[in-house]
Image: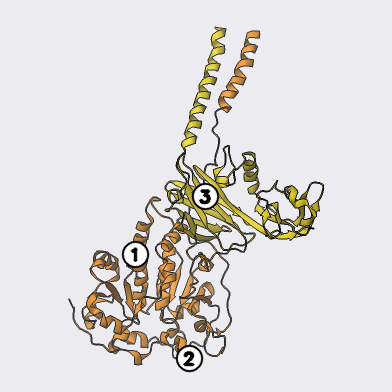
Amino acid sequence: MKRIKFLKFLIIPVALLLFTGCEKDKITDPLSVKTEDCAKLLWYLEDEGDIINTIPLPSLEAWEVKDYLGSSLVIDLRTNSRFIEGHISGAINIQHDSLFKYIKTNYSLFNDVVLVSASGQSAAYYASLLRLAGFPNVYYLNFGMAFWNSMFSSVWTDRLALEPDTTILFTHTDYPKRSYSSLPQINIIPSDLPMKDFVETRIEGMIKEGFDEEYYSSSNSTMRFSDWISRKEQLYTICIGSQMFYSSSSDTTITYHPEGAVLYHIPGPADFRSTSYLQTLPSESPIAIYSGTGQESAFYTAYLRLLGYDVKSILFGMNNIDYYMLLRADEIIPYAFQPSYIFDYPYTSGTGK
Amino acid sequence: MKKHLIIIPFIFFIMSCERSQIVESDVTNQSYIVVNSELNPYKLFAGVTFTKTLPVGIPYDIKAAELKDVTAYIKINGVRVIPLHYTNDGVYKPLYNDLVIERGNTYELFAEWGETVIYSATKVPFPPEINNVSYDAGGNYLQANIKTHPDEVYGAIWVIGSGSAKDETFPNLSIPEASSYNTNVITSPLPEQYRASEYNGKRNIQVYAFDKQYTAYFNSAKVNVPVGNAFTQNGGTINWNVFGNNVIGMFIGVAKGNQKNVN
């Protein structure tokens, strides 16, 4: 019995030493935290140049396209039947669902790529996405084929709101931005997929999904103003542009905005920067953006949808909300579609090349 | 038989100690990622530095030590994401370098370097508000009574004139009771030469407020006798507040108060 006691007395302390004496010093605790895909996506887009917040809109006037036709690839994104009716000489007809693949294959063969659509809005949307995908020399034709020749201008002239909807309250009130909220959740699958590949795949999908600049119905990325009127209570509506475009402070009779719309400055000290107001956009509720022509809002809608926001661009912008407001101040007149500015350049009928 | 039973545990014991020696040897050559950032209220965010330790015997060179390919961002109050991008010398900043740090906010650091995930969090303290100051002639130290805020600790240094001489370290940290609104914080004793009457009116106290996480670092670094720079300390385990495998460093909120004259 004594022997057993003696052995217990000896073995237990030694065993304790054995199990406790060899722990390594812990420099830091083991990590259970994971980085978030949405944050890494934002990081990547900034690291690639943050083109949305740093460059002016990559639009070209019709005269610029005409002058540089020789060295540029002009891609007409309209339907084949409209292309046959008339197109810019030398342009090729590509549908949006094959646009990304075509650009990826042929981008290096040309100095610049000019996207042409009927109104300019879908071309602005695709130009934004292609630039985000790493094709920096992609531009869009301002006001689309409508500014090239009056033959194609009805897409705009039919949408000018010469008599604004009287049920809408226009105001000069500055509506505040919302509080900061989380970025939209993004899940990258598989988790080890390089961000570059993820972005490329996502952009290709978005381009294939399309941007319907026709006015027949709202779509994933577009909204008719008439639909906005019926849904405005559920939407976070933002106006992008300058203060003058939103509401002139000196003379409040000149410019104004629909009730509830919140101003985000674009361009200049862009409000979509991570360090400014990007995350005041709600990630859990739909957003409607309007601008002067709808082209600007299309351009930014592309970026915000890439980040995962549920954003729709209000088609034709202020031209389709209150056309005459755009004509009241020099600073914003360029946003008005003015038939007198149509270039009436020649066009080619038939299938082209 | 009894002899054998006694010997076996001793063999285990001795073998286990041998293994411990090998671990120590490995640690000596282990390369660490070093993270360093101070967040000061009302100041532009100065960024986060990511470097790695160099092998023993290699002279320190920032170009060799800096990490250029870290994916990093900070998150403010659990919501706002601010990506950080490489600038130079291992320093990562927001793209537009226009982020002003706000007191009371919590900042989290997330980063990836290769397979290593790095994380830290800190709450930025309020700039210290001094109620009154005094000179303890007996202990030859300066003292300030200050307003306190939750999750903050305080340290103080003496400063002569406009800074011609000043203390380098705090003697200790003042850790207020959770329920208190005020606390006292003291400096190290003044060196002999600054106790003379000719320095009356030139003795100042400067109070620093820290995120309370600083306490663990301060106490461990103090025990291990840092030699000026915390990242070249003499040895022993420092309690860093940056986490990750083989990651050390501090990501800490610090508020530096104004100098207050002590007659």
Q: Reading the chain from its start, which is encountered first: label 1 or label 2?
A: 1
Residue B79, image x, y percentages: 55, 60
Q: Is residue A172 above or below residue B74?
A: below
Amino acid identity at mark 2: Arg
- Amino acid found under the numbered disc labelled 1: Gly
Using the image, determine if residue B190 lies above or below residue A21. below
Q: What chain does mark 3 sit on?
A: B
Secondary element at image label 2: loop
At mark 1, the secondary structure is loop
Letter of the chain that mark 1 sits on in the rendering: A
The front one of A350 and B144 is B144
Q: Closer to the camera: disc 1 or disc 3?
A: 3
Task: Identify the disc placed on residue B244.
Answer: none
Residue hosting label 1: A134
Residue where numbered disc 3 is placed: B35
Label at residue A328: 2
Q: For mark 1, does the 10 Å Cα neighbourhood hold few (<14), some (14 to 19), or many (20 or more) residues?
A: some
Left or right: where A239 falls relative to A88: right
Q: Residue furthest left?
A: A353
- Quarter of the figure with residue A7: top right
Chain A's shade in the image?
orange
For chain B, the rendered hue is yellow
